[in-house]
Amino acid sequence: MTTSTDDLFSERERLVDIARRILASAAEAERAVDLTFARWLELSPEERASTGSRRDRLTEILARICLELLGHTPGPLPVSSPPASSASTEPADRVTLDDSMYMLLLVVLDSLRPEERVAFILHDVFGVAYRGIADVVGRSADDARELARSARRQIHQQRLRESPPDRHRAVVLELLRAVEQRDATAVCGLLHDDVIALVDTGGTADVAPAPVGGAEKVVRLLIALSGLTPPVTVTAQPVNGRLGLVARRDSRVVGVVSLSVSGGAIRDIWIVTAPDKLRRWNDS
């Protein structure tokens, strides 16, 4: 590794995190960051020095690469851009992306236009100013603001479709019983035909590199996870404000499951096994 590439390594974790949230794929995120570093190294020293901070420039390059991977072709990257730091973001115009909100974002990703994904993730999650996002998507700052708002509205609409807490609780408890009994028919009966399951391993394993869609495939995934070796103990307890499932091996939490129930059926399942995201469960 050269001195130049070694110097970039400190930015990798943050860039991979951005790309994973936009692309919903760990493998594609790694690829996007590799391409980002390659493009950065192609810039002349003068070009690098004329564009504000290195972090801002890398973020812009990465976002544009993500747009390309999503099938959207942005315009040329400006030679000189204003800083895209968080100093001029509008805090009141952002949502708190807790685990449940992130789950909803993943669920609606396919319905969001690429520019909406990028605007929302960069602004609401990573605090990039709208003027910096405008350079990335090739639109005005006001347009970038509206793109983020549009994504926000769609996520909110998804949340409004969820069942009342009592019905949600009943369905989750039924799912727990069915999974414990490895009753595939009973599990399938609780799932919406278009159910989506997402497994967030944090890149530590390739359990599900892409969202798993459809009741039949999700049933197989849940039954397979219930038969892990060494075995785990699964209990129902609050996750992100609603009843979810928590898997423990001995006394250590190794998985947390958040579910979205709509119309009495499970539509979305988010399974988190990433050690860094489970740290707060094990430290409490």
Image (cartoon, rainbow, N blue to C red):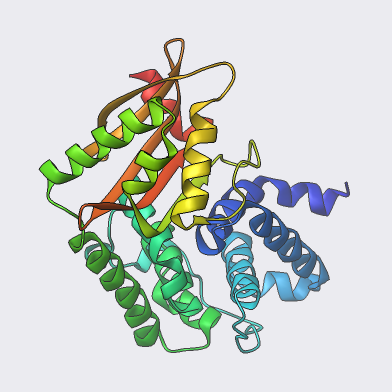
Residue 280 shows in the view: no
Is 144 left, or right, of 249 in this rendering?
left
Q: Is residue 55 visible?
A: yes
Is 167 located above or below residue 196 in the figure? above
- In the picture, residue 158 is in which quadrant? bottom left
Q: Residue at x 80, y 52 (%)?
A: 5
Q: Position of residue 99 (x, y in %)?
A: 35, 45
* Depth order, front residue of 134/161: 161
Q: Residue furthest right?
A: 2
- Residue closest to the far front: 185
Instruction: Name the foreground residue: 122 vs 192.
Output: 192
Picture layout, residue 193 above or below residue 153: above
Residue 279: x, y in percent? 44, 27
Residue drawn at x 33%, y 47% is 189
Image-based side of 167 in relation to 277, left or right: left
Report the label total: 0
Residue at x 75% of width, y 67% of height: 40
Residue 54 spot, x, y in % from top left? 63, 62
27 vs 115, nearest the viewer: 27
Which x, y percent locates residue 91?
26, 62
Q: Quadrant of the C terminus?
A: top left
Quadrant position of residue 68? bottom right
Looking at the image, residue 265 lies above or below residue 256: below
**Which is nearer the eye, 284 or 80?**
284
